[in-house]
Amino acid sequence: MQAKTTLAGMALAVLCAASAHAQVPAGYPADYQKIIDGAKKEGKLVIYGATDSKAAQPLIRDFNALYPAITVEYNDMNSTEVYNRFISETAAGGATADLTWSSAVDLQMRLAVEDYALQYKSVEAASLPAWAKWNDKAYGTTFEPAVFVYNKRLVSEKEVPQTHADFVKAITAEKFRDKVTTYDIEKSGVGFMFMAQDSLDFPQFPALEAAFGTARVRVQSSTGTMLERISSGENLIGYNVLGPYALARAKTDPSIGVVMPKDYTLVISRVAFISKNAQHVNAAKLWLDYLLSVRGQTVVANESKLFAIRSDVKGEATAAALTRQLGEKNIKPLAVHPNLLQFLAPVKRMAFLKQWKETAGKK
């Protein structure tokens, strides 16, 4: 009886050991097991994210299904809050995020360039577009269009703009006075970045600012608030709204219509990086690799609906599907690159905000 018990115990031990090693994903180096084992010992991962908890939860659930020993503490903030909290806590030498994940690509790049990010070559890096990664520190994880959103009950088909020039013309109509919304570019990092990029890509940008002023644009710091106000009719149309949230809302809300501009559509990729001083560094590496993997990207596309960046992932919310729909020439992805920092220089940022307030921001 004792021999049987011993044999059973040995068999169980072998099975457990095999199970532990089976967690190394196919194609990963064998020594990746050290990262997995280290993450299990750490037992925790702290993420600061500018991704709605509702969109992040499917990823967290699936990650926990793979690695149940790791507790994920996810802190949902807007993009500016992610930056400010991370940088202030780091400066104070206190506990902060192991990994930050934000749609404000420029702010993430500033942190990466200023040496807040750990240099870690993800095993999944080769599967990303060249423009979506920088120096083995900052990684783009999604492929998200900036869209126009309108109230389908109150805006007729003929009034719906299809291009940026159409938008300028549309919102100068009396009907849209006090009924146009966009991000508060002083408070929303992604909003500032989108608008700064438009100033480079849209030849009629001064006319756009003036049209916002004529319409007495209403600004918000969150996508959710804009969608709520457009749905209710308090606002009729929104500019540069993050596409994944708008498209997800449109599927369940008959009042919400979405347009991807036909002249060009800006695309951002939520950037993730591991903190150079991460307390749970192995868990952070594990999360980053999972997020960029085919499995993680499939969840991004089909459950989180954030648009997968990998070209080998299938689904409606993917870079491949969006490229087919709009055409490669009409898509303008914002590269994960220090070039994005030009508008963050204090003098240039203040000049841009001053111009905005004097034109678009006037009431």
Image (cartoon, rainbow, N blue to C red):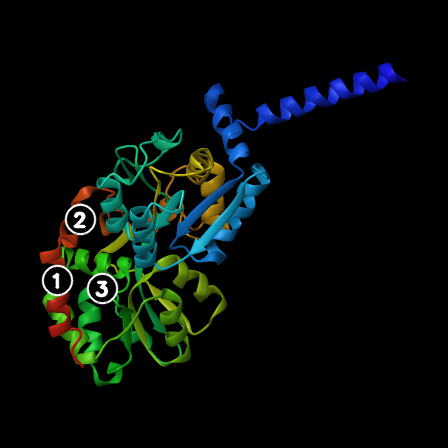
Q: Position of residue 151 (x, y in %)?
A: 37, 75
Neighbours of disc 1 within 10 Å: few (<14), some (14-19), many (20+): some
Q: Which element type, helix, strand or loop, lies under badge 1? A: helix
Neighbours of disc 3 within 10 Å: few (<14), some (14-19), many (20+): some
Would you say the residues marked 2 and 1 are in contact, meaning their CB atoms lie under 8 Å apart? no
Which amino acid does the dot numbered 3 rest on? Thr
Q: Residue at x 49, y 19 (%)?
A: 30
* Left or right, residue 316 beside residue 210: right
Name the residue beneath numbered marker 2.
341
Q: Position of residue 349 (x, y in %)?
A: 14, 59
**Rendering quarter of residue 235:** bottom left
Which amino acid does the dot numbered 2 rest on? Leu
Q: Label 3 to label 2, Cα distance in Å?
A: 27 Å
Q: Quadrant of the C terminus?
A: bottom left
Q: Label 1 to label 3, Cα distance in Å?
A: 28 Å
Residue 189, numbered label? none
Q: Earlier in the sequence, mark 1 or mark 3?
A: 3
Residue 163, numbered label? 3
Q: Position of residue 64 (x, y in %)?
A: 56, 42
* Left or right, residue 190 beside residue 307: left
Q: Quadrant of the N terminus?
A: top right
Q: Is residue 187 above or below residue 333?
A: below
